[in-house]
Image (cartoon, grey):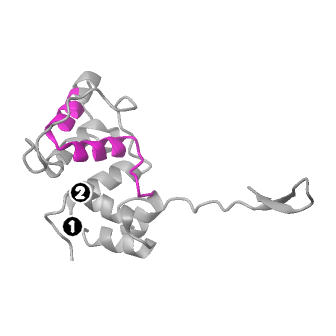
Amino acid sequence: MPNYSESLPELISRVKKAKTKQDKIDILRSYDKTVALHSVLQGAFHPDVTWELPEGIPPYRKDDSEYGLSPSIIDREVRKLPYLTSFSGQLVQSRMKREEIFINMLECMHPSESELIIQMKEKKIDGLNARLVWEAFPNLIPEPPAPVKRKVSKKKKSNGQEEPTT
């Protein structure tokens, strides 16, 4: 049963700490009606989403208030994401205006939510990968390529024993 008082960063942290892949999928699926979660996951793992923003962490002033007392929350701020990517067809044409929108988003949310949005923009959310997201929500992103398995060859040590190499 989902805990809807849990923040999105707390949810992602819980997924990261889950022991098995199926536990991770179950946690994600329990929040299947959460628009903010879908927006962040699609922004991070959909191959067609390209963020029209500079790489890296922008200079912004972190909100220092307690969680829940920030001027805004991620659930409200994700509505601005379509203005920052050409994938949506709603891209703001002025680069400076896009960067201003993004920085304002980061400054009005709790730092944990801002960090999650930055990870989304950089297309890498700690504890998640495209395959896991696709298995939890197959209609959200296209199926990622299967992971490549590397052969392990054995190399002889100078003392005559074999050691595995990759």
Residue at (22, 31) in percent of width and height = 103
Residue 120 appears at what percent x and percent y?
Answer: 34, 46
- Is 128 placed above or below 95 here? below
Crowding near pointer 1: few (<14 within 10 Å), some, many (20+)?
few
Residue at (66, 62) in percent of width and height = 149
Task: From the viewer's perspective, tell me whether residue 7 is left or right of residue 151.
Answer: left
Quarter holding the C terminus is bottom right
Residue 35 appears at what percent x and percent y?
Answer: 21, 58
Which of marks 2 and 1 precedes in the sequence?
A: 2
- The kind of residue on which mark 1 rests is Lys
Nearest the viewer among 14 and 159 is: 159
Magenta region, residue range? 100-129
- Is 162 placed above or below 39 here? below
Judging by the rendered image, the residue that carries numbered circle 1 is: 33
Judging by the rendered image, the residue that carries numbered circle 2 is: 8
- The kind of residue on which mark 2 rests is Leu
Residue 51 appears at what percent x and percent y?
Answer: 36, 38
Which of the 4 image quarters holds residue 151?
A: bottom right
